[in-house]
Amino acid sequence: MSTDIKQAMHVEAGKSFGTSEANENERRWDEDKIDRKNQDPTNHYDKTRMKLNFEIGPDGKIHPLGYQKKSLEVRLQERLAELSWKPFKPDSKIQPNCCAKFIFGGNHDRMLEMAFGEQTVNLEKDADNNHLHRCEEIEHWAKDVYDWCVRRYGQENIVGF
């Protein structure tokens, strides 16, 4: 029996996002924040794997997550200002959607294989995965997806990836 390897793209329209969501996406957290988040039994942030997170910058290159000086929230507001985007009415409580939030992923086992190759990953809570290094294959996949987004939507419209 073979396992189908699939990719997925989830798109959600958004009115914007605030500081908390931007910080969540960029993992702009200290140790205390991670520990507080992990008090919630539904959260499982592995501190030992956080060093493996990355983003692709406007230069199309791999960078550590959260490397940009300006937060995601600020970059979105700057892009909206460049476009002269305004809500329907200045005093309106109803705000139109102004951004699209994308999540790209795929088959769990295949994503782990691309990210870690043959390395053993312990997915148990509080596991020590300090031995892991990120494999280039996941970076190539992310760059391919980024390049598709640039061709489809324009690099100037990507405020974080």
Image (tube, grey):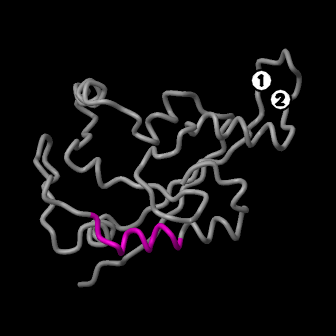
In what element is the residue under mark 2? loop
Q: Residue at x 29, y 50 (%)?
A: 51
Which percent across, then down, holds residue 81?
Answer: 80, 37
Q: Residue at x 27, y 83 (%)?
A: 2
Quick one: quadrant of the C terminus? bottom right
Which percent across, then down, holds residue 116?
Answer: 24, 67
For this view, does 15 lie left or right of residue 60?
Answer: right
* Mark carried by residue 94: 1
Q: Residue at x 43, y 36 (%)?
A: 24
Kind of residue indicated by mark 2: Pro
Which percent across, then down, holds residue 5?
Answer: 37, 76
Magenta span: 134-144
Sooner in the amino-acid sequence: mark 1 or mark 2: 2
Which percent across, then down, holds residue 71?
Answer: 55, 36
For this view, does 113 lie left or right of residue 122?
Answer: right
Task: State the predominant SS element of the stretch in magenta.
Answer: helix
Disc 2 target residue: 87
